[in-house]
Amino acid sequence: MNILRVKTLISMILTLFMAAAFCSRCWAEESSYQASTIVFAKDGGGLALTIKGNMSPTFTTYQLFDPLRVIIDIANASFAESLHLPIEVNQAPVAKISGSVLAEKQPVIAKLEVLLSSDSQYTVKRNGNDITLVFSADKTEKNEAPPAPATAAPEPKMVPELKNSPGRPEIYDLKIGKEAGQVTVLLVADGPIQEFTKVALAKGDGRPDRMYIDIPGVKAPALDRKMKVGAGGVSQIRISDRAEGARFVFDSSMDKLFAFSVAPAPEGLLVSIGDGDTEAAPQETVKAPESDLVSKILASSKEEPRKKPSSSKPSPKAGNGDEFAEAGYNREKISVDFYKTNLHNVFRLMGEVGGYNIVIDESVSGVLTLSLREVPWDFLLDVILNLKSLQKVERYNTIVISAKDKGFVWPEKPINEKEDFLVETPSQEMGVEISKQLNQPPAVLEAKRIIQQGNSLAKEGKFKEALGLYQSALDKWPDNADLAKRMAGMCLVDLGYNQAAVDYAKKALAINGHDPEAALQAAVGLANMRQPEARLYFEKAISTSKPSRSALLSYAGFQEENENYTGAIATLTKFTELYSASLETMIARARIFDKQGNSDLAVKEYKSIMYSGYDLAPDLAQYIKGRIALANKQ
């Protein structure tokens, strides 16, 4: 009988174990996104690619350069065995799709890289279980409309495609000469470059006026992909390898395109640039320059060797044409599309793009939905920090991200030698005061002696010891509301004991239920612990005819933290009515408008801050200029 029971018990355990394992596997499969296939389709002259999956995905999309590619990071995801990567697409503008699984990341990330053969506008959206990436009709630079008649240029001639071969010529250096507002650029090769195409393009799609030169049958692997110029109306030179050769793009830093000429040189190809009007016929062949000019460029350039770009990839400041640069944001520009993306993954991306080490405090949490195109990554970082009320500390190539104070103003009554708040103010009639002292109970007199000892310890910064003495005094003098508030303030400001601060503040309120200072202390302590009860105490703290500044600012911060943006604006408005606007309230209003998605009101507030005359911290002024630049760009 016992053997039968044992067998039955073992059978039940095995059954439960197998069921649990099966359910665990099923749960894992159901809670993990699996990309099974990628479908391509024409979309209004463009190309759409759809990633098919088994559940609603959480993903991040962003664009990187050199090589030009769009990245899709899918959280908690994997690739089905039926999806064979990489895929050679070769349908403009998509050249190739590759994928990898970052198993060491938490959560696991399935990364798809869509390599582009040319720059193209794109949109990304989630359709049920699928992710669809749509590239608009080809708007590569060679097909873009020419600029206005004043700077018009004929369509470039088409050059035959030349395959990359071991014998392909190489442009192995780029020499820049600057003199009297003129710039000369020598593309250095083993001999003269006779065949090339040059095209002038008008500004559009967030890009400046520019000129590019296509040189067929060459490669330029040794050159930096971006080179700063900052003279002659040229902000930078961008270089990209193409199937048929190499492209050199010259970006203008002015409101118009610079004048230029291009001609073969004994050592390669010479580009002469000035800040005048654009040449009328950019495809016209010019006589080869005299050798002494080329020699001068080569000689001068040897004195200033090119430097490798830093890991953070600063983007050249583009004179009058780049408001971001003028605002102080000069890092590499990127395009991102975050959809309910974990903040830790967002900051991981920022670290990868910017070349920084990123340390994220455990208090940082939440998700982000945000889409921005062609903005400096350091501006993007500031936008995210501002929206999520976070702060950064940057030091030694490392950025530390942590939660910042949401505007709470801690009530604090510093101890000083001229004040002993626990002893009654001396009366002018000393006889009455002496009689009053003699009539006090012995317990109160002993409590005052202990309080003075506690005050001495607090002055020395020994707050824990002082709190212990204050507690002894409160036991002897339990109806001393001022002492209870002093203890609450010490717990909040000096010790970080939120629950203890709330308890002492409630003791003070039990003695005087209409004390706004004690109500504020209780509210702040509860808010620090994310307790919804804090709202009741904030309401009590501002219920007087003229609430304190700290009560109004703290309540507005609490309302913003809890996404009660309408209430926060109303509280800040009340502050302005009572005390007039301050820099702190103006910044808070702008930040809240941004969180509400009300960009017009946010920008209006930011402009008011810039014109207010307040002495702004450099990083704040930089952020506001960048935010206004973003609005102007849109």
Image (cartoon, rainbow, N blue to C red):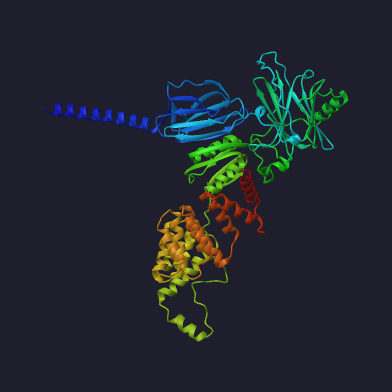
Image quadrant of residue 267? top right
- Residue 586 to residue 135: above or below: below
The residue that appears at 59% across and 35% down in the rendered structure is: 353
- Residue 70 to residue 523: above or below: above
In the image shown, does 170 or 278 lie closer to the viewer? Answer: 278
The picture places residue 499, in percent across and down from the top left corner, at 42, 57
The picture places residue 69, in percent across and down from the top left corner, at 58, 29
The residue that appears at 58% across and 24% down in the rendered structure is: 92
- Residue 366 to residue 577: above or below: above
The residue that appears at 53% across and 24% down in the rendered structure is: 97
The picture places residue 310, in percent across and down from the top left corner, at 67, 34
Horizontal arrangement in the rendering, residue 56 relative to residue 375 (left or right) = left
Image quadrant holding the N terminus, namely top left
Horizontal arrangement in the rendering, residue 329 relative to residue 91 (left or right) = right
In the image shown, does 65 or 123 lie closer to the viewer? Answer: 123
Image quadrant holding the C terminus, namely top right
